[in-house]
Image: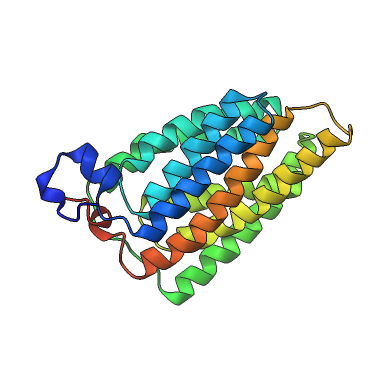
């Protein structure tokens, strides 16, 4: 693909410039995975939209590109519905925050082309604070009778911290997203099993499966993005900036 971003318009530069062959292959696989899940259990088109939008949002986020917030808005709106029908109240609240954060992120990234990193001591306190916030969220969500509050709390409170760091372009956001994605794979996986064995009728099998596939995809992307940002490859929107 074209490496010279100056020859094309903004949309082309954001979508197609400066991709490694490995990245193109794994993005294609992640999107196909969402479509395969929908083909197997086609009972939630919204779930599939959420999955594809989430993959594109975080993949372009890995590249450090503003267009990620457009796909993020699509994913968050769809995910809000999926979380509501699944009684995943932590996820539901978080997705509302995500929707609000998309235009904020768009604005912030438009004024800062470089990624940042905290000092070691500051990084340690951020991770300690995230752990304390998770414990408090667990207690609150359990009191609201949410499903699997110990996992849902990770998605609720830790995601807020990760999203804030993401908007501010701090590299440590990806370390927190790795924790969130692992918790979400377990969370949606357990809900899927509960539906399969008839332990619950809340939510839909297709929507839950799409979230398992999405979170597995985002986990892989977060691990890869952690390396990309650490090497400074996301600066200047991954080569798509002006």
- In terms of depth relative to the viewer, which is nearer, 15 or 96? 15
Residue at x 74% of width, y 45% of height: 189
Taking the image as drawn, is residue 137 in sight?
no
Residue at x 48% of width, y 59% of height: 174
Residue 227: x and y in percent read 43, 67
Image-based side of 5 in relation to 32, left or right: left
Residue 70: x and y in percent read 36, 34
**In this view, 61 is above or below 202:** below
Image-based side of 206 in relation to 108, left or right: right
In the rendered picture of this protein, how many numbered marks are placed on residues?
0
Residue at x 48% of width, y 69% of height: 123
- In terms of depth relative to the viewer, which is nearer, 173 or 45? 45
**In this view, 12 is above or below 39:** below
Q: Quadrant of residue 201?
A: top right
Residue 193: x and y in percent read 81, 41
Residue at x 16% of width, y 50% of height: 5
Image-based side of 48 in relation to 99, left or right: right
**In this view, 132 is above or below 82:** below
Q: Residue furthest bottom?
A: 120
């Amino acid at each position: 693909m074209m490496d010279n971003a100056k020859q094309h318009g903004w949309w082309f530069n954001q979508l197609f410039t400066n991709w490694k062959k490995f990245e193109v292959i794994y993005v294609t696989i992640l999107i196909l995975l969402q479509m395969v899940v929908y083909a197997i259990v086609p009972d939630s088109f919204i779930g599939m939209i959420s999955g594809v939008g989430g993959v594109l949002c975080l993949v372009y986020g890995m590249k450090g590109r503003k267009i990620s917030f457009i796909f993020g808005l699509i994913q968050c709106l769809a995910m809000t519905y999926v979380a509501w029908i699944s009684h995943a109240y932590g996820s539901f609240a978080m997705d509302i925050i995500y929707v609000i954060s998309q235009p904020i992120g768009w604005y912030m990234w438009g004024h800062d082309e470089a990624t940042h990193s905290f000092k070691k001591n500051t990084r340690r306190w951020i991770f300690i604070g995230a752990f304390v916030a998770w414990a408090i969220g667990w207690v609150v969500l359990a009191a609201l009778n949410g499903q699997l509050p110990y996992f849902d709390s990770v998605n609720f409170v830790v995601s807020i911290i990760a999203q804030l760091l993401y908007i501010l372009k701090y590299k440590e956001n990806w370390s927190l997203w790795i924790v969130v994605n692992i918790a979400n794979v377990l969370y949606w996986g357990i809900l899927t099993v509960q539906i399969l064995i008839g332990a619950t009728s809340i939510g839909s099998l297709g929507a839950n499966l799409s979230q398992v596939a999405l979170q597995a995809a985002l986990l892989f992307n977060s691990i890869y993005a952690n390396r990309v940002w650490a090497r400074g490859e996301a600066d200047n929107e991954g080569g798509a900036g002006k």
